[in-house]
Amino acid sequence: MMDHLLRSMARSLNLEEDLVLGVKPDTDRSGITVLLQDKEVEGLQVLVDDKWINDPTIPEALVVNLGDQMQIMSNGVFKSILHRVVTNTEKLRMSVAMFNEPEAENEIGPVESLVDETRPRLYRNVKLCCYLLYKVLKTEACEKHTGLKGLFA
C-alpha cells in the first residue's frame, strides 16, 4: 500500500519516483535508534571513510544506531552515524524503527563527568524543541543559541 501511495504522490508532483522513495543522508535526532530491517531487501547505507557502505540485511537482527542526542550527552565521545536509505525499483522494502528520546521540553546536554580540562564542553544544554528547529533550519542564530555548530553533516 505504501509503495502505491508514494508512487501516486510522486506522479501527482511530476517527480521521478526514486527521488521520493529514498531517504537523504541524515543522522537520527534520537539518543538511540533500534531498527528491524526488511529480511530480504537491502537499502540502509552508512558513510564510512567518505564511502557509502551497504548495511547487510541479517534476518531477525536489530540494527542499533547512536543518534545526535547521544553525541551531545557523551560530549562527542560517541558519534551519531550519517546514513541514508536507497531505493530498490524491483521490490518494496519494509523496516520498523524505534527511537529513544526525551520529551520535547526536557533539556539535554553533556554529562558533567565527561567534561574536564582535557575534554572541554562541546555542546550547550538544549531543549529538544530548540534542537529540532536547529536540525531543520541550521541557521547561525540557532547555532549560537544551541552550541550545536558542526554536529550535523
Image (cartoon, grey):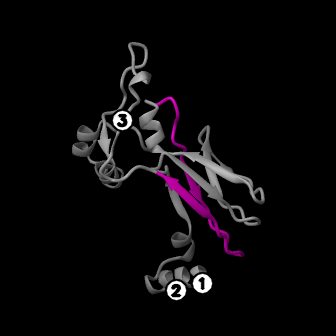
The residue indicated by pointer 3 is: 109
Considering the image in quadrants, where does the N terminus appear?
Answer: bottom right
Dominant secondary structure, magenta: loop
Q: Which residue is more in the foreground, 148 or 117?
A: 117
Bounds of the magenta span? 76-100
Q: Are marks 1 and 2 in contact (CB under 8 Å)?
A: no
Amino acid type shown at disc 2? Ser
The residue indicated by pointer 1 is: 1
The residue indicated by pointer 2 is: 8
Where residue 25 sits in the image (x, y, percent)? 51, 54
Helix, strand or loop at mark 2 = helix
Q: CA distance from mark 2 to mark 3?
A: 42 Å
Helix, strand or loop at mark 1 = loop
Q: Left or right of 70: which side holds 45?
A: right
Q: CA distance from mark 1 to mark 2?
A: 11 Å
Q: Left or right of 101: which side holds 7?
A: right
N-terminal-most mark, 1 or 3: 1
Residue lying at 44% horizontally and 23% vertically, measured from the top left: 114
Residue lying at 48% horizontally and 78% vertically, measured from the top left: 15
Res. 111 mark: none
Is residue 153 at all visible to an observer of this figure?
no
Q: Nearer the viewer, mark 1 or mark 3?
A: 3
N-terminal-most mark, 1 or 2: 1
Dot 1 alpha-carbon crowd within 10 angstroms: few under 14, some 14 to 19, many 20 or more? few
Q: CA distance from mark 1 to mark 3?
A: 41 Å
Answer above or below: position of 23 versus 5: above
Q: Is residue 144 magenta?
A: no
Where residue 19 sits in the image (x, y, percent)? 52, 70
Answer above or below: position of 74 versus 27: above
Dot 3 alpha-carbon crowd within 10 angstroms: few under 14, some 14 to 19, many 20 or more? many
Where residue 112 sits in the image (x, y, percent)? 38, 25
Is residue 136 at all visible to an observer of this figure?
yes
